[in-house]
Amino acid sequence: MDLPVIEPSPAAAAGCSADSCGATARQVDGLSDAIRARVQDHPCYSEDAHHYFARMHVAVAPACNIQCHYCNRKYDCANESRPGVVSELLTPDQAVRKTLAVAAAIPQMSVLGIAGPGDPLANPERTFETFRQLALKAPDIKLCVSTNGLVLPEYVEELARYNIDHVTITINCVDPEIGARIYPWIFWKNRRVCGREAAAILIGQQQKGLEMLSARGILVKVNSVLIPGVNDAHLPEVSKIVKAKGAFLHNVMPLIAEAGHGTFYGVMGQRSPQPAELKALQDACAGDMNMMRHCRQCRADAVGLLGEDRGAEFTLDRIENMEVDYEAAIVVRAELRAQIAAELAQKRARAHAHAASATPQVIKFQPQGAKPAPAVGRPVLMAVAAKSGLVAVHFGHATEFLVYEASAAGARLVGHRRAASYCAGDETCGDAEAVLAETIRALADCEVVLCSRIGYEPWGQLEAAGIQPNGEYAMQPIEEAVIAVWNEMLAAGRLTVGQPAARRA
Amino acid sequence: MALEIVDSCVNCWACQPLCPQQAIQAATPHFLIDADKCTECSGDFAAPQCASICPIEGAIINELGEALNPPGSLTGIPPARWAAVQAEIAAR
C-alpha cells in the first residue's frame, strides 16, 4: 500500500540533543523552550495547556496482547472513568467522523489519541488507518498514541511516518521479578508466555521502543501505575532509567482497584495508594525527572477537557446527524489557538516578571557542621475549584479540586482530587451531607480551599475540619491566587517553620 | 476437530487476525469459528492461536466442551476467591 509520507518537522528531527537531555536549558516549570513549543497545546503533556485545551480518545483498538493485573477486559461500563473502559467501539471511518465532529464542536480540542481499550499497536490496521485518514483530513490535530510497548519497536517507523509526535509507554517496572507480579501473561511469537519470562520480554521491548523513539526525536511520556507493596519502592529507579533513555515526562498514577471492577488486584484485595503516598513518590522522583501531576486517568473514549467527559454528546447516532464543515472549523480553531497562546505567553511573562522582582534565591556553600539558614515560611497545600486556569467554580458545584503546594518558591500543582458535586441544586441534595463529608476527607491534607463562592453550611464544616475556605479570589488566575493567600498566611505569622497547621495544633 | 467461541466472548478482535485458516468471523452477540475451517492450528502452530491470545477464561471451548483457558488460568484469581467476592458484592 502506498502511504502519504509526512516529513518530520525540524523540531521533531532535532531529537533529544535539543530538549530533554539538555538540563541547562530548563525553565521554571522544568521543560526546555524547545519541548514547551511542542507540547504547548497538548493537555496531557503540558500542565499549562490542560487548563485550556481538550483531548479526545477514539476507541478503535479493542485487542490486547498482554494482561495487566489492574485491567479487566470486559470493558463496557458507562459509569466508570478509568483507562481501558469504553462504551462504544469504533471502526476507523467512524472514528474519523467522530473526531471531525468533535473538533468542529469543541475548537479547544487539539489532540486525538488512541489509547485502547486494548493496545493500539496490537490493532495496527485499525490504529494506523485512523491516523492515516486524520493526518490528511485534520492536519491541525495532534495525533498521539499510548501503548504497553510489547510490539512498539516494530512500529516506530510507521508512527514517525504519520507525524505522531507524542507516544506514551506504560512502564511499571524494569525488574522482571516485579513484572511477574503485575503481568500474568503476554502473547509473544504465537504463544502465551507467563510469569517472569513474560515480564522480561515485555520490559526488554519497552526499553528498546523507548530508545528507538528517543533516537527519532519523538517525545515520550512514561506512565507508571503506583501499586503499593509491588512497585512503589522500585518506581524512583524506573524514573531514573527512563529519563536516561530519553523520556521527557513521567506520570505516576495511583492504582485503581475495586472488587467490583473484576480485576486481579481488585478481587484479591490489593489496596490503592493514598493521595499522600502518591505525592511523596512523585516528589521522590521529581529530583531526577519532570513529573506529571495533572493526569485524570481518563477513559479510552474520553472527550473534552481533562477532568470532564463529554463523550455522551458524541455517540455514533448523534454524530450521524451532525453537519461538519471542517474547512470553517479549521479557521475557528486556529483563531482560538492563537488567542490561547497569547494568553499563555502573557501569563508566563507575568510569572517571569514576578520571579525577577522577587529576591533571588541564592544557594550558598555551607561549610560542614554549619547550621542551615532558616527557611522562611513552610509549604502549604491548597485545593482549588478551577476552570480554565482560574479560581472559577462554586465549591458546591466542583467535581474535582486541583491541589497546589504554595511555598516561597511559588505555586506548584501537585495533584487533583475527585469530588461528587456537593450541590446539584435538585433532589440529589438529599445526599449533600454524605458528599460533603467525603469531599472534606479527600481534602484532609489541604489547609485552604479556593473557590469562586461557597455556601454557609459547607464553610462552617470546612473550617471545623481545619480547612480555610476562601472565596476572595474568584475569577483570578490560580497561581496568583495561591501565592497571594500564602503571602497573607505568611504575613499573619501562620507559616513559621515547624509550626503545624492550626487544626493539628 | 474444531474449537468454538461461546457467549462470554467480549468481541475484542484479538483472535480474528491470528487464525491461520481465516476461520474466525466477527459477529454479534459474539465472534464465531467456522467449524469446517478450524483445524485447532494443528500443522501451523504448537498451540491454537485464538486460545493463546483470548483474554477471557472459558470463552473458547473444544469439542468436548472443555475450556481451553479454564477459570483462574488467565487472571490468576482463584475461582473460590472470585465466587466469594461476587457473593459479597451481590449481598451489598
Image: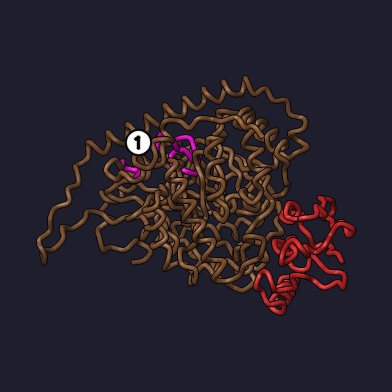
Chain colours: A brown, B red
Q: Position of residue A198 (x, y in %)?
A: 57, 66
Near-viewer residue (B73 or B64):
B64
The tally of labels here is 1
Q: Is residue A38 magenta?
A: yes
- The kind of secondary structure element at disc 1 is helix
The secondary structure that most of the magenta stretch takes on is loop
- Residue hosting label 1: A33
Is residue A492 at least partly visible in the picture? yes
Q: Residue at x 41, y 55 (%)?
A: A242
- Above or below, A338 against A462 in this view is above
In the foreground, B19 or A125: B19
Outermost residue toward the front in this view: B43
Q: Is residue A1 left or right of residue A436?
A: right
Q: Which residues are magenta?
A: A27-50
Relative horizontal placement of residue A84, taking residue A218 as reference (left or right):
right
Residue occupying image coordinates x 28% and y 56%: A378
As rendered, which of A24 and A122 lies closer to the eye? A122
What is the residue that sits farthest to the right in this orientation?
A: B36
Image spot of residue A130 (x, y percent): 65, 38
Vertical side of A95 occupied by B66: above or below: below
Looking at the picture, how far across and down is residue B8, in whole percent? 80, 62
Up/down of A381 relative to A112, above or below: below
Residue at (51, 22) in percent of width and height? A335
Q: Position of residue A96 (x, y in %)?
A: 68, 34
Which one is in front, A491 or A442? Answer: A442
Residue type, mark 1 in image: Asp
Residue at figure coordinates x 50%, y 27% from the top left: A337
Q: Where is residue A47, by image quadrant?
A: top left
